[in-house]
Image (cartoon, rainbow, N blue to C red):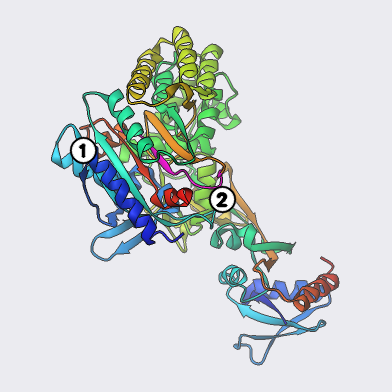
Amino acid sequence: MLKLGVPSKGRLMDKTFQWFGQRGVTLRKSGSDREYAGAVDGIDGVELVLLSAGEIPRELAAGNIHLGVTGSDLVREKLANWDSRVTELAPMGFGGADLIIAVPQLWVDVDTLDDLDAAAAAFREQHGFRLRIATKYHRLVREFLRDHGVADYQLVDSQGATEGTVKNETAEAIADITSTGETLRANGLKILDDGLIHASQATLFRGRRAGWTDEQRQKLKALQLVLGI
Amino acid sequence: MPSGNPETLTEARRLRDHFAANGAQVVKADVLQSADTLLDLYGEDIRARAYLTADPLRGEMVLRPDFTVPVVQMHMESHADPARYTYSGKVFRKQESDEARANEYVQVGYEVFDGQNPAGADAEVFAVIADALAGLPVRAATGDIGVLMAAVRGLQTTDARKAALLRHIWRPGRFKALLKRYGGGTMPASRAALLAADDPFAAAGPDIGLRSREEVTTRIAALRADAAAAPIAGEEIALIDAILSLRETCPNVLSALRDIAVDMPAVRDAVGRMSARLDAMAARGIDVARLEFEGSYGRTSLEYYDGFVFGFYAIDRPDLPPVATGGRYDALTARLGQGRAVPAVGGVIRPDLVVGLSC
């Protein structure tokens, strides 16, 4: 049996069902609407597991599910060495959003990471603490800023309403997901020219944990054939 | 090999006794340290490399990633000079990319605080550690971040540019990019547009956040000054590149650096210190004629080394982390001592790796 993990609610679930449906595999919730049990038609030996999108990376890496649909940003954020633990089978073309760094529009002197680094140095000198960047994507942001040689910043955790943290003076800049940039502009923020950390979209992943049976391998091949990926 | 196995602990004891026999006082440090100091020193990078945890009363705490910071703090309260310390205990490091590397292991260290004779102290730490590793299949690598820093300070350019370069000594990518731009590279389009604008704040949004309009104005003025400054001469950049690409035995490097000092007198003192150090090492029986030196050695470590740096590596085992590392960290003592600096140099050995190489 091959376990396929899919987001358990909302637009991401609907779009995932649609994507599989268009390729001849019907995924549906079984039982009542509130129950997180699922069924698969159109191919044998595949079991649907409904999970929170945020838990799918961990369950894939642990081998509790064999395949999973989730945002490519979540896989990179939640799994160290993500590409040694899961493989991308197919980008799915929806759920697109960019993880970006944004600063106040007032900062007319800051358009690049180079500017951000210089502003952070001056800020620390002036205020006595490191420039704060609010985010929930700690790993991705830290690795990105390290790779680009930005110093004198600190990350502060923000699990929601991140665009408001600058106005509320709990952060000086933010790193967050955006699809249109509208909320950023409404909150007096702008995206750095080279501040794109990751362009995310919903993606079908397979776990790379060892211990797949031959039957499971064949089942995956059959599924890939049906899906045309 | 588990970090707490009996052979490792026996070896750790031997090493600590060896350091104590060289005059070091045995000291201890708490496993849980306040995270504030480390966060202030190293910033976000420390979160990727150390285990942070929350204490309801004491705030953010860290499982000690090394002993250097607590030992320096302890020393700054004692005011003894000179002083030598040794310690043995576990340190904890997150391994974000290499699962094969240990995330807790024993370190045995030797730290010397001696303001009278820095060259002698450098040589002493290196020799005492080399002696502890005698007979093992290891090779030594050395470098001197002080030479690079002296070269940067001696550049014929603005203080702001020198400060920016010095700030990024430990981030080679950013350092190179800055040097290229200061050397006449093109300015980003967004900056050129900003400096050409009649009203730089024309497109500014509302005044939000802690970084004020005055701070933005101050930086624009700094950008204007930088744009007006002459580029750093190609000859000077070539000398920095020459220092960074040095990779030879110590005597050959010393003679190359003396040549560089003719064109760049600012490095003369640092080269003199290196020469004194090599003499002191030779006097302690180190074969300096065969000792390797790399101009950019020690620039990618988390540590605060700003002078002599060294490491001992297992020959034929490039997969292993260094068996021993160390260096001079005067700037760290200045930061922790709130202005009061004590010249300091030290190194650590990993007894688990020593045991692995002995059998």
Q: Which residues are magenta?
A: B317-329
Task: Tell me residue A113's x, y (percent).
Answer: 52, 39
Disc 2 chain ID: A
| Relative depth, front residue between B130 and A189 | B130
Mark linked to residue B246: none
Residues at marks 1 and 2, CA–CA distance in whole angstroms: 54 Å
Q: Label 1 sits on what residue type?
A: Gly
| Relative depth, front residue between A105 and A216 | A216
Kindly give the residue lying farthest to the top in the view shown: B262
Location of residue B331 by image quarter? top left
Question: Residue at point 54% right, 62% down?
Answer: A78
Q: Secondary structure at mark 2?
A: strand
Q: Secondary structure at mark 1?
A: loop
Q: Is residue B268 left or right of residue A83?
A: left
Question: Residue at point 43% right, 23% down?
Answer: B288
Q: Label 2 sits on what residue type?
A: Ile
Question: Residue at point 49% right, 53% down?
Answer: A187
Residue B326 painted magenta = yes
Q: Which residue is mark 1?
A: B23
Q: Is residue B43 above or below residue B105?
A: above
> How many numbered tags mark residues here?
2
Q: Which residue is mark 2?
A: A100
Q: Is residue B292 left or right of residue A229?
A: left
Task: Tell me residue A13's x, y (percent).
Answer: 66, 75
Residue B335 painted magenta = no
